[in-house]
Amino acid sequence: MPALLTVDLEWAAIAPTIARRIVATWALGQQSSDAAIEDIALVVSELVTRAIDGARGDPHLEAERTADELRIRVSSPERLDLPTSSPLDAIGPLVLAALCTEWGVDTTAETTTQWAHLDLAVPRRD
């Protein structure tokens, strides 16, 4: 049976740090390896940072773990205007591509949901 975490975050600069700590603690309780926890925290931080930088309104985080996969979703209560003006803005997608089996963004007229899937069966590093 999958383990599920849901967190309502406040729209604030500290939200990525809070989300990272909450998810890392949850993942530790799910018996994730140290390397997996580092990857999970980095992905969560990137998704929440993009939500904070690109929209106004409180983001909502969901993480669902099965035996060998973690699915993370960060929803914003409006369409995201994802930053693209600086070379630094390209680093986040590179991090997501390196750590995730797949990732993307789904938008509707009212919300934007960024999502990422991590394969926990294959260790990334020790």
Image (spheres, grey):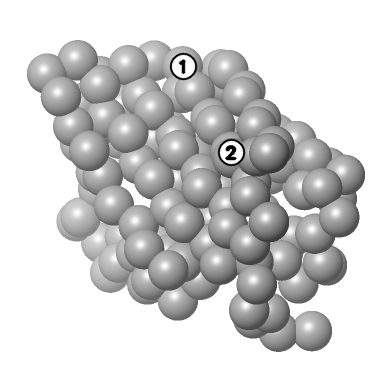
What is the three-letter code of the residue carrying label 1? Answer: Asp
Circle 1 — which element?
loop
Question: Does residue 107 appear anywhere in the picture?
Answer: yes
Q: Is residue 126 above or below residue 37?
A: below
Residue 4 placement: quadrant: top right
Label 2 with label 1: CB-CB less than 8 Å: no
Viewer-side residue, 58 vs 29? 29
What is the three-letter code of the residue carrying label 2? Answer: Ala
Location of residue 24 in the rendering, given as x and y in whole percent from the top left corner:
77, 47
Image quadrant containing the C terminus: bottom right
Q: Residue at the spot x=30%, y=67% of the render? A: 90
The residue labelled by disc 1 is 58
Location of residue 31 in the rendering, given as x and y in whole percent from the top left corner:
86, 55
Question: Does residue 19 appear anywhere in the picture?
Answer: no
Q: CA distance from mark 2 to mark 1?
A: 17 Å
The residue labelled by disc 2 is 63
Q: In the displayed structure, does residue 92 sit left or right of residue 111?
A: right
